[in-house]
Image (cartoon, rainbow, N blue to C red):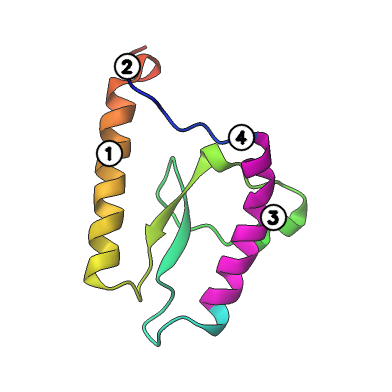
């Protein structure tokens, strides 16, 4: 039997806190080359400015993903590449992707 992680309501409500910490870290603790992690739109792969959520449009976890930023090192880039490959395989196997 295969198990899949599903974000709970509790975890989903924590997302704004984590995004806020990421914004702070990207502003104050990123290397000179830029942030190590970005939020990107899942459908387009384009970076998302998380401050756009202040307009009232909520960030929906299913619509975004993390991506390596310009300051990410080789190890971080490799980890993100593995996560992306796993997501692509999972989406290809999904019954919805075959519809």
Which tag, 3 or 4, sits closer to the chain's start? Answer: 4
Q: Left or right: where does residue 93 sit relative to residue 4?
A: left
Q: Left or right: where does residue 5 sit relative to residue 98?
A: right
Quadrant of residue 7 within the rendered picture? top right
Q: Position of residue 60 (x, y in %)?
A: 61, 41
Element type where label 3 sits in the image: helix
* Disc 4 to disc 1: CB gap under 8 Å: no
Disc 3: which residue: 53
Quadrant of residue 67 within the rendered picture? bottom left
Q: Which one is closest to the eye, mark 3 or mark 2?
A: 2
Residue depicted at x 52% and y 75%: 26
Disc 4: which residue: 8
Q: Position of residue 34 (x, y in %)?
A: 41, 79
* Disc 2 to disc 4: CB gap under 8 Å: no
Q: Which one is closest to the eye, mark 3 or mark 4?
A: 4
Real-space Cα separation, disc 4 to disc 1, in angstroms: 21 Å
Element type where label 4 sits in the image: loop
* Disc 1 to disc 2: CB gap under 8 Å: no
Real-space Cα separation, disc 2 to disc 4, in angstroms: 21 Å
Q: Which one is closest to the eye, mark 4 or mark 1?
A: 4
User: Which numbered dot is residue 1?
Assistant: 2
Element type where label 2 sits in the image: loop
Which tag, 3 or 1, sits closer to the chain's start? Answer: 3
Real-space Cα separation, disc 3 to disc 1, in angstroms: 28 Å
Disc 1: which residue: 86
Quadrant of residue 37 within the rendered picture? bottom left
Residue 13 inside the magenta-drawn segment: yes
Real-space Cα separation, disc 3 to disc 4, in angstroms: 21 Å
Residue range of the region highlighted in magenta in the rendering: 9-26
């Amino acid at each position: 039997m295969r198990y899949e992680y599903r974000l709970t309501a509790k975890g989903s409500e924590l997302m704004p806190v984590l995004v806020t910490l990421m914004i702070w870290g990207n502003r104050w603790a990123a290397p000179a080359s830029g942030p190590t992690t970005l939020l990107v739109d899942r459908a387009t792969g384009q970076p998302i400015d998380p401050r756009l959520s202040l307009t009232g449009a909520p960030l929906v976890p299913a619509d975004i993903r993390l991506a390596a930023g310009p300051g990410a090192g080789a190890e971080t880039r490799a980890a993100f590449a593995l996560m992306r490959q796993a997501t692509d395989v999972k989406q290809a196997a999904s019954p919805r992707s075959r519809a």
